Image: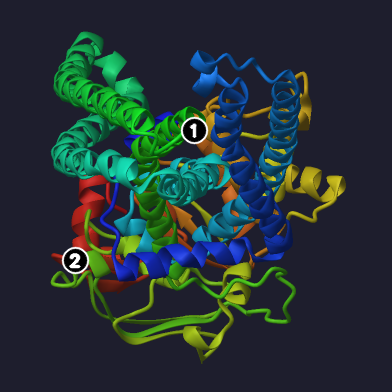
């Protein structure tokens, strides 16, 4: 019987439909390169299954060879026949062992190669999906697709599928052999199977409802863990460890309650199956003995029939559970196919291109709404022209559309109407990878990957030499603090860069952007949450980085944008004002003047 894993237990079964099967069958395209070995494995599977079916017949022969049918007539045991049958049985066991070994070995090899290809293809496809997709999906759910769903397929192709085919073959061949030995006895034996099957179907529907409730509760408890660990700083700052512990306890207690209810019903059903199974065996033996006494069959044939009955009965019992595992695998396959059916962005394997932008950017009557909130227009008629090398600040209240504007610059999304152009050419006319290769983005909350400082800086140019990395770090005012670490550029920054301070993370991100040497720079105010010294070092690095480049700065602190060539003031998705710092301060009742008064005591 197929072994279970925690992943497969948590995965819901799906109703098998024609559409679902079409999706599921597509998984075999990843098996295609290894189809020859897979077919060889199937041949070994068939061979080992048919070999095992010889055992009951040979055991019947062994009993028949003793002459026990005629003991009362004074016949003696035929030792020659016993020895021959015993040797054949031993040969059958050895053959089955060899066939089973190679079947497992081949299926495991094929499965591991297939799933490695599937994982790589799914991950490569996933990271090429547009931002619109990620705005609708949770990270935990996507991670589950690559981990849990693929693990279920691993179990299915390694053991479950092979075991299902073996049990199915056992049932077909077993029933045929039962009819060969005695049609009357087979009819009696098979009469009990429909009763158990109907009971199993009804029970399965009931258990699926309970299982779905359990899975929903498990999902809720996982959300609690994810939220708590993600916001662990807040949990500790507000001393809410006990509160979170109780919240998780309540959730897991509910899981336990439903699981125990499920266990009671499973136990009751198992007891019913045991009684029905052994009752049917007793019935078969009772009727078989009557047939033996009536000289309608031999004792050896009865023994063989009983053993085949046990084989067939065990296979009927096992195949239901295996079928449910296959249902879960089909569900996992559908989940993966849904991801693979999503349209990806056109990102080539290599980023070699000849597109070099000068940095001229224009927005022409741009309107935009996020796909998840189509009724809410975020940008409404945005128009402006920026010359190469200009520094542009984007300011405005929260929700004005500042981040959305930068999302359109990076082509994370496309406008619903209007046009964004670079060097006078529509953004959609450029290869996406080529366009983004001419830009660099430094966010307010820097995300560093869990590797070394060197690896994080080199993320801006993965082919960079050691000298280029060091030079970029110096321009970002990062080299000095890096050299204070014992492992210098090989220092591991920890998950999300937790081992570094905020200012250090910002300078690593700036070094990454320096190394990329972009034509257009997008900055989400990188100094708003830093202390004075860190702010000075980061601002110096930013000034060097922005020099000679078209720069868009989302500004939260207006003191950092006094020297900007152009300041765009957004409000409710529209450009309220536009000009340089001094021009905007001269606008009476202007929004920029109002924001300045809130931040400065003396307005210049």
Q: Nearer the viewer, residue 214 or 454?
A: 214
Tell me where residue 22 appears, x and y as whole percent.
40, 70
Around disc 2, counting alpha carbons within 10 Å, would you say few (fewer than 14), some (14 to 19), or many (20 or more)?
few
Residue 418 in view: yes
* In-front residue for pair 479/590: 479
> To which quarter of the image does residue 120 belong?
bottom right
Q: Neighbour class for label 1 at 10 Å: few (<14), some, many (≥20)?
A: many
Which residue is nearer to you in this view: 231 or 64? 64
Q: Is residue 234 above or below residue 109?
A: above
Which residue in the protein does label 1 denote? 304
Q: Is residue 163 left or right of residue 107?
A: left
Q: Quadrant of the C terminus?
A: bottom left
C-alpha distance separating marks 2 and 1: 69 Å
Quarter of image, res 23: bottom left
Question: Position of 198 compared to 92: left or right?
Answer: left
Percent coordinates x, y for residue 113 in the rendering: 69, 50
């Amino acid at each position: 019987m197929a072994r279970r894993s925690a992943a497969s237990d948590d995965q819901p079964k799906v109703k098998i439909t024609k559409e679902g099967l079409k999706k599921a069958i597509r998984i075999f395209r990843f098996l295609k390169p290894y189809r020859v070995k897979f077919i060889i494995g199937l041949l070994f599977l068939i061979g080992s299954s048919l070999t095992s079916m010889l055992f009951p017949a040979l055991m019947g022969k062994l009993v028949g060879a003793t002459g026990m049918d005629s003991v009362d007539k004074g016949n003696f045991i035929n030792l020659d026949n016993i020895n021959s049958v015993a040797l054949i049985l031993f040969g059958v066991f050895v053959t089955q062992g060899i066939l089973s070994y190679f079947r497992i070995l081949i299926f495991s090899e094929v499965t591991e190669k297939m799933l490695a290809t599937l994982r790589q293809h799914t991950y490569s496809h996933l990271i090429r999906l547009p931002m619109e997709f990620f705005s609708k999906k949770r990270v935990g759910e996507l991670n589950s697709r690559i981990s849990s769903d693929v693990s279920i397929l691993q179990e299915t192709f390694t053991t479950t599928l092979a075991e299902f085919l073996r049990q199915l073959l056992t049932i077909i061949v077993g029933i045929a052999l039962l009819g060969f030995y005695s049609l009357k006895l087979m009819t009696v034996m098979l009469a009990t199977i429909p009763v158990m099957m109907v009971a199993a179907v009804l029970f399965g529907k009931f258990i699926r409802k309970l299982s779905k409730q359990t899975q929903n509760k498990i999902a809720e408890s996982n959300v609690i863990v994810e939220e708590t660990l993600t916001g662990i700083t807040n949990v500790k700052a507000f001393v809410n460890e006990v509160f979170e512990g109780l919240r998780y306890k309540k959730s897991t207690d509910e899981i336990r309650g439903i699981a125990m209810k499920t266990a009671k019903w499973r136990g009751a059903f198992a007891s019913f199956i045991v009684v029905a199974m052994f009752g049917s065996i007793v019935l078969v033996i009772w009727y078989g003995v009557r047939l033996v006494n009536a000289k309608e069959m031999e004792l050896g044939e009865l023994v063989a029939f009983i053993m085949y009955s046990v084989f067939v009965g065990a296979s009927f019992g096992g195949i239901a559970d295996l079928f449910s595992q296959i249902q879960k695998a089909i569900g996992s396959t559908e989940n993966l196919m849904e991801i693979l059916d999503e349209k990806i962005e056109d990102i080539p394997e290599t980023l070699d291109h000849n597109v070099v932008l000068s940095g001229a950017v224009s927005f022409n009557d741009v309107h935009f709404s996020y796909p998840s909130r189509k009724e809410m227009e975020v940008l409404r008629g945005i128009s402006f022209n920026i010359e190469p090398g200009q520094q542009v600040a984007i300011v405005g209240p929260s929700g004005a559309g500042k981040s959305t504007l930068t999302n359109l610059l990076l082509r994370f999304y496309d406008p619903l109407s209007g046009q964004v152009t670079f060097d006078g050419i529509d953004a959609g006319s450029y290869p996406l990878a080529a366009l983004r290769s001419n830009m660099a983005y430094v966010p307010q909350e820097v995300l560093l990957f869990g590797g070394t400082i060197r690896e994080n800086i080199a993320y801006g140019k993965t082919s960079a030499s050691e000298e280029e990395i060091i030079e970029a770090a110096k321009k970002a005012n990062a080299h000095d603090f890096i050299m204070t670490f014992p492992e210098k550029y090989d220092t591991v920054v920890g998950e999300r860069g937790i081992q570094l301070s905020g200012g250090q993370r910002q300078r690593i991100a700036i070094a990454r952007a320096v190394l990329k040497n972009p034509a257009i720079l997008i900055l989400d105010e990188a100094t708003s949450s830093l202390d004075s010294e860190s702010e000075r070092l980061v601002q110096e690095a930013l000034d060097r980085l922005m020099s000679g480049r078209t720069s868009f700065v989302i500004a939260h602190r207006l003191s950092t944008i006094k020297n900007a060539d152009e300041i765009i003031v957004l409000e409710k998705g529209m450009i309220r004002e536009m000009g340089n710092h001094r021009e905007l301060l001269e606008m009476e009742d202007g929004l920029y003047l109002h924001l300045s008064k809130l931040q400065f005591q003396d307005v210049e």
